[in-house]
């Protein structure tokens, strides 16, 4: 469901209910100036309702085929409702509206016709349905937001874990580098000791040979 369409729909339902109430109240107004003012307000409201119907139509036709068909079916009901309002406005704004009301047997000027009550009830019901859809959309948004926050917290925790592991790897690398240096130093020392030991052995061998030669030559 399009949030834009729902916004227009909510505005239309509120406007339709308001226009129905004004149409009902015109019949009990005796002051001509006040009646003209109310009729002018109803006329402006009907024009505004026409604009909202056109906006809903454009929005519905821009959506996916499945959603589009559902919204256009709903839009047809709104158009029929608006046509009834226009007929009602035309009736109450005609010069003979007062006589027509008297002839129709409306002795109680405060009573409301069954058709008007049904239209008002339908408008209120649609408004309630629209409000319920908005509440459901808000609840979905809140749940999505909570899920997003939870995912961000998990990602932050994973990031901390990765940073901790990276630090451990860095420490291990440092320890390995130090071990390499120690082993290199030890290897050099061992090599140096080997050379020293070899030199001592060679010196001893030469000394033994010299001593042995000296003893033989003095016999």
Image (tube, rainbow, N blue to C red):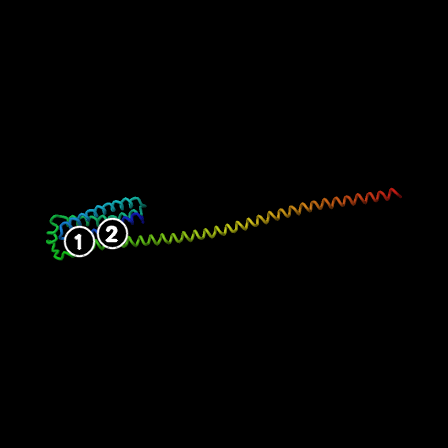
Q: Which mark is residue 38?
A: none
Quarter residue 188 falls in: top right
Quarter occupied by the C terminus: top right
Residue 56 pos. (x, y %): 27, 46
Judged left or right of residue 111, residue 170 is: right
Residue 108 pos. (x, y %): 13, 57
Residue 77 pos. (x, y %): 24, 50
Residue annotated with mark 2: 14
How packed mark 1 is, by other alpha carbons closer than 10 Å (few <14, some 14-19, many 20 or more), is some
Q: Tag count in the figure? A: 2
Residue 189 pos. (x, y %): 68, 46
Q: Residue furthest right?
A: 219
Q: Are marks 2 and 1 in contact (CB under 8 Å)?
A: no
Q: Residue at x 73, y 45 (%)?
A: 196
**Among numbered discs 2 and 1, the one appearing first in the sequence:** 2
Judged left or right of residue 219, residue 128 is: left
Separation of residues labelled 2 and 1 (CA atoms) = 17 Å
Judged left or right of residue 80, residue 145 is: right
Q: Residue furthest top?
A: 217
Q: Residue at x 22, y 52 (%)?
A: 18
How packed mark 2 is, by other alpha carbons closer than 10 Å (few <14, some 14-19, many 20 or more), is some
Q: Residue at x 20, y 46 (%)?
A: 44
Q: Secondary structure at mark 1?
A: helix
Q: Residue at x 24, y 51 (%)?
A: 14
Q: Secondary structure at mark 2?
A: helix
Residue annotated with mark 1: 25
């Amino acid at each position: 469901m399009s949030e834009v369409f729902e916004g227009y729909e909510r505005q239309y339902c509120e406007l339709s209910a308001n226009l129905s109430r004004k149409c009902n109240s015109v019949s009990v107004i005796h002051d001509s100036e006040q009646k003209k003012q109310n009729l002018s307000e109803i006329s402006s409201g009907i024009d505004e309702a026409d604009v909202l119907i056109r906006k809903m139509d454009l929005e519905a036709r821009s959506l996916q085929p499945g959603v589009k068909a559902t919204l256009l079916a709903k839009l047809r009901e709104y158009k029929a409702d608006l046509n009834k309002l226009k007929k009602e406005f035309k009736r109450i704004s005609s010069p003979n509206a007062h006589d027509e009301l008297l002839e129709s047997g409306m002795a109680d000027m405060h009573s409301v016709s069954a058709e008007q009550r049904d239209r008002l009830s339908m408008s209120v019901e649609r408004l309630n349905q629209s409000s319920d859809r908005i509440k459901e959309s808000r609840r979905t948004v809140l749940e999505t937001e909570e899920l997003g926050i939870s995912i961000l917290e998990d990602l932050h925790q994973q990031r901390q874990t990765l940073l901790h592991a990276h630090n451990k790897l860095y420490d291990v690398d440092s320890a390995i580098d130090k071990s390499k240096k120690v082993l290199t130093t030890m290897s050099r020392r061992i090599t140096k000791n080997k050379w020293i030991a070899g030199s001592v052995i060679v010196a001893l061998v030469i000394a033994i040979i010299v001593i042995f030669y000296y003893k033989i030559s003095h016999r």
